[in-house]
Image (cartoon, rainbow, N blue to C red):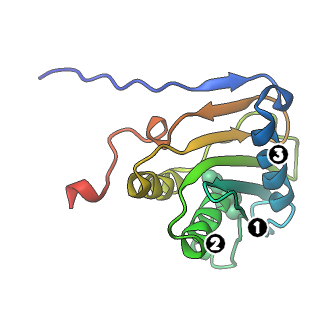
Amino acid sequence: MKEVKVESTFFVFDDLKDIPSDVQQLMQNASEARDNAYAPYSKFHVGTAILLDNDEVVTGSNQENASYPSGLCAERTAIYYSGAKYPKAKILKMAIIAGSTKNITSKPIPPCGACRQAIAEYEVKQESPIEIYFMGETGKVVKSNSLANLLPLLFDKSVL
Ligand code: THU
């Protein structure tokens, strides 16, 4: 038996104004998308904006359903739309902003496991890393240079 350690590196910015200006703009796009979240059940609103290598920005927000599992997270709404509309474009950056309407969320909210798996699919498909930035409504912004940092021991097409 041997122990295997997996390391992940993240970068933490104290404030939105500390991140690169193009990502500030992308986070603004995510924030506007968040305004369109449909989350009457959880009251947790999430917005995502994706910057593609064709300069297009695709956004999404979480969309809930009375049949709870039928709803979809903001990240997957955005990434599937991006894949559907611009199948040849590469995803460069993804900005995520999230928080409850019941209180101010100031801690960075990472994508859920299912969204990580979905983002991983596109990172593998395009053979280049996707930069991911996530935050609460205010406060620190976390950056990951690749989805791989968020999802070690990936299940991908190589195992099929
Ligand atoms: N949600 C997202 O949109 N993204 C995530 O990564 C985590 C959760 C949504 C799903 C649901 O509408 C609400 O947040 C509460 O889980």
Disc on res. 25: 3
Mark 3 falls on what kind of element? Answer: helix
- For the residues marked 2 and 1, what is the alpha-carbon distance in whole angstroms? 10 Å
Is the C-beta separation of discs 3 and 2 under 8 Å? no
For this view, does 123 lie left or right of residue 21? Answer: left
Label 2 beta carbon less than 8 Å to ligand 1: yes
Q: Residue at x 21, y 62 (%)?
A: 160
* Residue 81 screen position, x and y as percent: 62, 71
40 vs 47: above or below: below
Is the C-beta separation of discs 2 and 1 under 8 Å? yes
Q: Residue at x 31, y 55 (%)?
A: 156
Q: Residue at x 69, y 40 (%)?
A: 134
| Residue neighbourhood size for the residue with mark 2, other residues' Cα within 10 Å, grouped as few (<14), some (14–19), many (≥20) | some
Is the C-beta separation of discs 1 and 3 under 8 Å? no
* Residue 150 screen position, x and y as percent: 49, 39
18 vs 95: above or below: above
- Mark 1: amino acid: Tyr
- Mark 2: amino acid: Gly
Q: Earlier in the sequence, mark 3 or mark 2?
A: 3
Disc on res. 41: 1
Label 1 beta carbon less than 8 Å to ligand 1: yes
Q: Which residue is mark 2?
A: 71
- Mark 3: amino acid: Gln
Nearer the observer: mark 1 or 3; the answer is 3
Mark 1 falls on what kind of element? Answer: loop
Q: Residue at x 63, y 33 (%)?
A: 143
Image quarter for ligand 1 equals bottom right
